[in-house]
Amino acid sequence: MTNTRLYIEGGRKISGEIRVHGAKNSVLPILAATFLGAGEFKLSNCPALSDVFSATKILGSLGCKCRRTADILEVDSRTVTDCEIPEQLMREMRSSIVFLGAILGRLRRCRLSFPGGCELGPRPIDIHIAGLKKLGAKIIEDHGVLDCTLPETVTGAVITLPLPSVGATENIMLAAVKGTGQTVIQNAAREPEISDLAGFLNACGANISGQGSSTVVIKGVERLHGAEYPIMPDRIVAATWLGAAAITGGEVMLSGVRPEDMHSSLSVFEQMNLSVYPYSDRVYISAKKPLCAVKTVRTSPYPGFPTDCQPIVMAVLSVARGTSVIVENIFENRFRAAPELCRLGADIKAEGKVAVIEGVPRLSGAQLVATDLRAGAALILGGLAAEGTTTVSNVHYIDRGYESVEETLRSLGAKIKRI
Ligand code: EPZ
């Protein structure tokens, strides 16, 4: 599997219409929440991604039954056989740390291995741990295994996060839903995926308010019940297809999206001289005019410019006229697309949190290596624009967040195949 590569013949305009699939970063915490809910659930608009498959394997290891029919994923979590997540599954996907809050919320006990770092640098979970301890959790860390217990009744707390961590906000919400009293999360993450998780939990009988703002209030309830729920569209995948049209001078209509979740990325595309037309559940982009550099792009927590779009925008700016600067404020090792894009002829100097991009008139094909999910997506965009042939290896990173990426791009006019 790991020697699978994408083979791209670049220089063709990306144009056409595509429907954007459900959000990876929403369905993963919602799958953890189905364990908390202990019922029968039907998730629609559920993307077919390897990370989603990993999450269903974790649910299976806990005794749940999962069944997928097209984009509907059904989960029956009424029976439980374990409170421990096998190490191999924890290593497969870093974001499985969000199962900690769900398992604690239901069983009051959880054992799982420390997720460790990932391609983006060390991924600490100190904010998760501190928040859960404020809820009364006892967490023993022993040789990379976390052994956690939560008191029988969670009576609520006021938890102020040192930074608006998405995963920590989700874990605390999941651990606080069942209990008495009220939990307030201050400086909570405001990402739309947090609101989607709260929407799902409230559909299951939880009592959460303030989601989407910096202060989330969870009033404890005694029990939850089954629910049906549509997963929100993936705003990062949407931005990726817009970037593909931008970098190849094409035009694309996206359907099934929520433009209101994408203001900051749409505004960066507009600053590049692209014509961007958001409608209710669609976005149209046209790259008929030459791309302009953007003076400074800074990543920040929502509603700021999303770090997940940073590698995508870096690729597009590499062929924009002028000098652009990107400041990556969220992750410490997230410029890994830069050296690979330079193999295509891009002129990018990345140092610490800053990358300086001198636009070049054209890129030419090369053999590239994907190092993580979004850097891999950026390399595909580079290959679509580059003259000649580009190969991208380590496609498994890309399959974590993009449903059949080559089929999608072929439907938009790309010459791309998986070998
Ligand atoms: C979520 O990761 C997303 N993953 C990431 O998307 C996304 O890049 C990130 O949020 C930021 O938006 C999922 O939702 C599954 P954080 P998460 O906790 O929750 C530091 C993708 O490509 N931090 O908001 O891990 C951390 O090191 C992925 O789809 C602590 O220091 O992000 C980072 O620098 C990549 N201590 C910053 O906060 C903690 O306890 C933001 O992390 C937790 C985080």
Image (cartoon, rainbow, N blue to C red):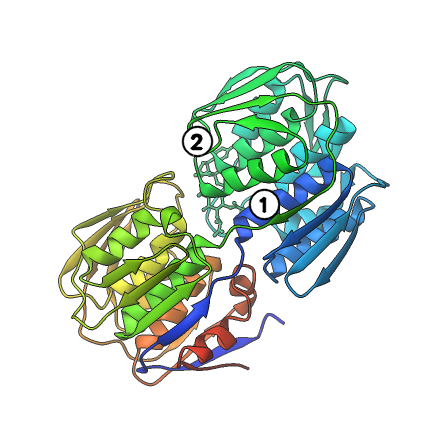
Seen in the picture, residue 216 relative to 192 is either above or below; the reply is above
* Image-based side of 368 in relation to 45, left or right: left
Q: Position of residue 355 (x, y in %)?
A: 26, 52
- Location of mark 2 (residue): 164
Q: Position of residue 207 (x, y in %)?
A: 61, 26
- Distance, label 2 to label 1, CA atoms, is 16 Å
Up-down: is 373 above or below 388? above
Quarter that holds the C terminus: bottom right
SS category of the residue bearing label 2: loop
Question: Residue at position x 53%, y 31% from top?
Answer: 169
- Please state, as top left, top right, bottom left or bottom right, where the N terminus lies in the image: bottom right
Please provide percent x and percent y for residue 255.
43, 63
Residue shown at 38% from the left, 59% from the top: 239
Q: Amino acid at mark 2?
A: Pro
In the figure, is residue 2 to the left or right of 275?
Answer: right
- The disc placed on residue 249 is none
**Which element type, helix, strand or loop, lies under badge 1?**
helix
Query: Neighbour class for label 1 at 10 Å: few (<14), some, many (≥20)?
Result: some
Residue 17: name its quadrant. bottom left
Residue situated furthest left in the rendering? 322
Q: Give whichever of discs 2 and 1 has the lower sequence position.
A: 1
Does any atom of ligand 1 lie closer than 8 Å to the CB of label 1?
yes
Res. 408 in view: yes
- The amino acid sitting under disc 1 is Ser
Disc 2 under 8 Å from ligand 1? The reply is yes
Q: Which residue is mark 1?
A: 95
Q: Quadrant of residue 154?
A: top right
Residue shown at 13% from the left, 62% from the top: 322
Residue 375, percent across and down? 42, 60
